[in-house]
Image: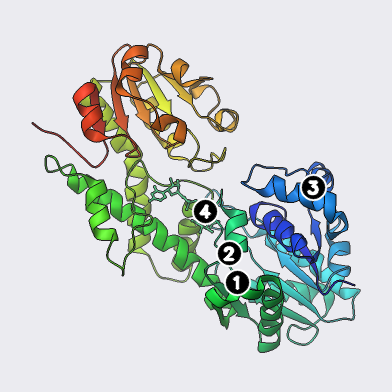
Amino acid sequence: MYKYKVSILGTGFIGLCSAACFAEKDIMVLASTHNEKKAKMINEGKAPFYEADLQEMMDDIKVNKTELLQCLTYPVKAVLETDISMITQGTPMREDRSIDLGYIESTAKEIGEALKQKDKYHLVVVRSTVVPGTSRNLVGKTITEVSGKEPGKDFGLCMQPEFLAEGRSIEDTLRPDRIVIGGFDDKSGEMLKEFYEYFYGDHLENCPILRMNLESAELVKYGNNCLLSTKISYANEFANFAELVPNVDISQVMKGVGLDYRINKRFLRAGVGFGGSCFHKDVNAIKAWSKSKGYTSRLLEAVLGINDDQAIHIVDIAEELAGKLAGKKVSLLGLAFKPGTDDMREAASIRVVEELRKRGVTDIIGYDPKANETAEVELGDKIKYAATIDEVLQDSECALLVTEWDEFKDLKPADFKRHMKSPNLVDGRRLYNYDEFNSAISFRAMGQIDLN
Ligand code: UGA
């Protein structure tokens, strides 16, 4: 009855957003997770995490297309009842910072169990971020070992990297700028291409589909995240150069650079550094992978080093402004790794708190419009948590702006003066008008210095 039946194995950002977008376009989706609570929520039409527009889409599916999106806790059944299976499991960072492929391997085993019982050709698509060789050597071989079936003959195998950013996952799924398809063979790639031609229709006029082999597609994803991270560390290196000269503004410098059509202005915002579940994880994973093959990456080592040092640098700036911070009350404006999310993974705030504590600061208070709860899981009692902006600033001797939430944008110098014991403010995201703040309170911004 439906042209396509797809199983989505893993219900994180990529999995669930894809599942919802596919169901909206009349593709029958069987999602699968081992987490019963999560499966129940999805089946009740409730998004198990916050992502812009996801809940609205799930509400619509629940009312109008409820049979098109179901979530099982038994992946073998999901694979058996569909024609295409997409692996959207997480690939977290291990203690030693290399990639953990445990979820990918166990999912490949489950697919193998299903294919053992199935005679029809089935397409398997790896959409998780995996180091080169994983789709062929781990996924493909595991499926063959468990099922006895051959890739290229009994089942197809593709790798299709994801470029979704948190907070934009639905928008990025519906309107990608390109689709990269790595195929084990031509038949596999062609089948996935046809699927996306059906799903995207006219949108493909502005969205090229690139075909390549599995390993090249795996490397495209790392190429992407490593270049974006490199742009940020490059902007931060120049922010540090800018601070060597009076009255240079890094925002203007990067605007001047970014208007070059060969470069573009995105990901050149300097500040306290990148965080999130992807950049650290992926840069470290490909670095560890290349090292295991005998090649040491000097560039990526520097990208991570520059990034993480920005957390030390903002504390240096704060101490230049407010004197030694030990014994003083310090406020953090924003804790999440970026605005619009409650995600704390690898957030710059964590590194800033570590640095403050190393310098003997014990009275730290933070406020985040969405991430106070997740921050508490991550930071525990290393800091206190305020419920409002007024509370976080109350009697503080130094405030650090760490995440550029909209609600911080509206603050004026008078707000800092009114609440703080001494209004020292360091802008770690270049949110405030430099001249306005610099003339009104004791102020510093990363990437600009006024030595007059
Ligand atoms: C990132 C990529 O942007 C996505 O394309 C990719 O698919 C995703 O990782 C992934 O691999 O799953 P995400 O981590 O959600 O997406 O967030 P970004 O919007 O890229 O921001 C990452 C970090 O960089 C944030 O901490 C942000 O504050 C920081 N950033 C970003 C800067 O410090 N400066 C900038 O100019 C831009």
Q: Which residue is drawn at 70% across and 71% down?
A: 199
Q: Which mark is residue 42?
A: 3
Helix, strand or loop status at disc 2: loop
Q: Mark 2 or mark 3, which is nearer the start of the sequence?
A: 3
Please tell me which of labels 4 and 2 falls first in the chain.
2
Tell me residue 36's x, y (percent): 83, 45
Using the image, determine if residue 327 lies above or below residue 291: above
Mark sitting earlier along the chain (3/4): 3
Marks 1/2: CA distance?
Answer: 7 Å
Rate crowding at label 3 as few (under 14), some (14 to 19) or many (20 or more) other CA atoms within 10 Å. Answer: many
Amino acid bearing label 2 = Arg
Q: In this view, does 98 lie above or below 290?
A: above
CB under 8 Å between discs 1 and 2: yes
- Discs 3/4, front: 3
Asked whether residue 113 is in view, the answer is yes
Q: Name the residue under label 2.
A: 175
Q: Mark 4 points at which residue?
A: 278
The answer for how far apart the CA atoms under marks 1 and 3 are is 28 Å
Q: Note whether ligand 1 is within 8 Å of mark 3.
A: no
- Compare residues 148 and 408 and report the one nearer the observer: 408
Report the Cα–Cα distance between label 4 and label 2.
21 Å
Nearest-to-viewer mark from 3 and 2? 2
Q: What residue type is labelled 1?
A: His
Mark 3–mark 2 Cα distance, whole angstroms, equals: 24 Å
Question: Does any portion of residue 137 appear in the rendered image?
Answer: no
- Is disc 1 placed on a helix, strand or loop? helix
- Some atom of ligand 1 lies within 8 Å of the CB belonging to the residue at label 2: no
Q: Which coloring applies here? A: rainbow
Q: Is residue 245 left or right of residue 81?
A: left
